[in-house]
Image (cartoon, grey):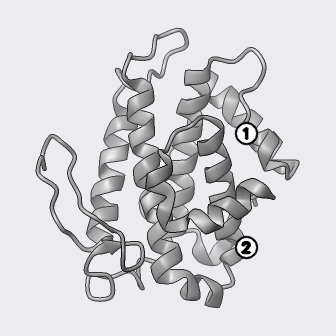
């Protein structure tokens, strides 16, 4: 079982896991991620490997973090329902509305599960778009690649913020808080290393984030 495995009871995911293409640069970097995570040193695990393309590193980690959130949220789908979570919120001060700029241009209020459903569909569309996330070695990344990655990370953070604010007690009762905390620490250290989320967006969990960064 991998470091981020949840055991057989919870091997359902919100949607199918995505993999880096075999034989590609992404697959090589994925092996590097697995090896460095196995060492337990998350601060080292997030750093760009010497000589590697920063965009390749961002791309393979974006897929990895998408999968991690997928697995985490998959354990909560029976509890995170439209009746329990009628809005996508992170405590009383923060509410998130959905827009993708294409099909839904004006932000709309939706339940938390609907927001996550829209989000995962949108991220999958980005990851599957070879003009954004090239699959072939040597294919250049587009000029807006980093902006797309930053939007993905900003929105994945909102899922973590919702889980911590609305479902942490359920996570504790499932004895999965150590797993959640490790995943979130990895996510925040990577985000901080590459400056992917503006500080203001991190406000709902900033006390937790400060403790991670100062540890």
Distance from the alpha carbon under mark 2 to that under mark 1: 20 Å
Residue located 81% across and 40% down the image? 44
52 up-or-down from 156: above or below: above
Q: In this view, does 97 lie to the left or right of 3?
A: left
Of 30 and 107, the residue lying toward us: 107
Tag 2: Cα neighbours inside 10 Å, few (<14), some, or many (≥20)?
Answer: few
- In x, y percent, where is residue 195? 56, 37
Q: Quadrant of the C terminus?
A: bottom right
Of 162 and 119, the residue lying toward us: 162
Tag 1: Cα neighbours inside 10 Å, few (<14), some, or many (≥20)?
Answer: many
- Visible in this render: residue 23? no
- In x, y percent, where is residue 68? 57, 56
Of 30 and 188, the residue lying toward us: 188
- In x, y percent, where is residue 95? 31, 69
Furthest-right residue in view?
A: 39
**Residue under numbered circle 1:** 33
Q: Is residue 141 left or right of residue 65?
A: left
Q: Which quadrant would residue 190 be assigned to in this image?
A: top right
- In x, y percent, where is residue 117? 31, 62
Residue located 63% across and 91% down the image? 173
Q: In this view, does 72 lie to the left or right of 15?
A: right
SS for tag 2?
helix
Residue 53's tag is: none
Residue located 39% across and 31% down the image? 147
Q: Quadrant of the N terminus?
A: bottom right
104 up-or-down from 160: above or below: above
Disc with the residue nearer the chain's start (2 vs 1):
1
Foreground label between 2 and 1: 2
Q: Are marks 2 and 1 in contact (CB under 8 Å)?
A: no
**Residue under numbered circle 2:** 178
SS for tag 1?
helix
- Visible in this render: residue 66? yes
């Amino acid at each position: 079982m991998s470091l981020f495995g949840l055991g057989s009871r919870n091997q359902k995911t919100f949607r199918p896991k995505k993999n880096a293409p075999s034989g590609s640069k992404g697959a090589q970097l994925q092996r590097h991620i697995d090896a460095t995570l196995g060492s337990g040193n998350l601060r080292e695990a997030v750093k760009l490997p010497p000589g590697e393309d920063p965009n390749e590193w961002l791309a393979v980690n974006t897929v990895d973090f998408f999968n991690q959130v997928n697995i985490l949220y998959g354990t909560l789908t029976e509890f995170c329902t439209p009746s329990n979570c009628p809005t996508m919120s992170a405590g009383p001060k923060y509410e998130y509305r959905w827009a993708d700029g294409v099909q839904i241009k004006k932000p709309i209020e939706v339940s938390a599960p609907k927001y996550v459903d829209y989000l995962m569909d949108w991220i999958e569309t980005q990851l599957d778009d070879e003009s954004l996330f090239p699959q072939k070695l040597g294919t250049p990344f587009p000029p807006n690649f980093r902006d797309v990655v930053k939007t993905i990370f900003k929105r994945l953070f909102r899922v973590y913020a919702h889980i911590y604010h609305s479902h942490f007690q359920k996570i504790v009762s499932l004895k999965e808080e150590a797993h959640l905390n490790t995943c979130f620490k990895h996510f925040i250290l990577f985000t901080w290393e590459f400056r992917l989320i503006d500080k203001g967006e991190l406000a709902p969990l900033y006390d937790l984030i400060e403790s991670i960064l100062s540890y």
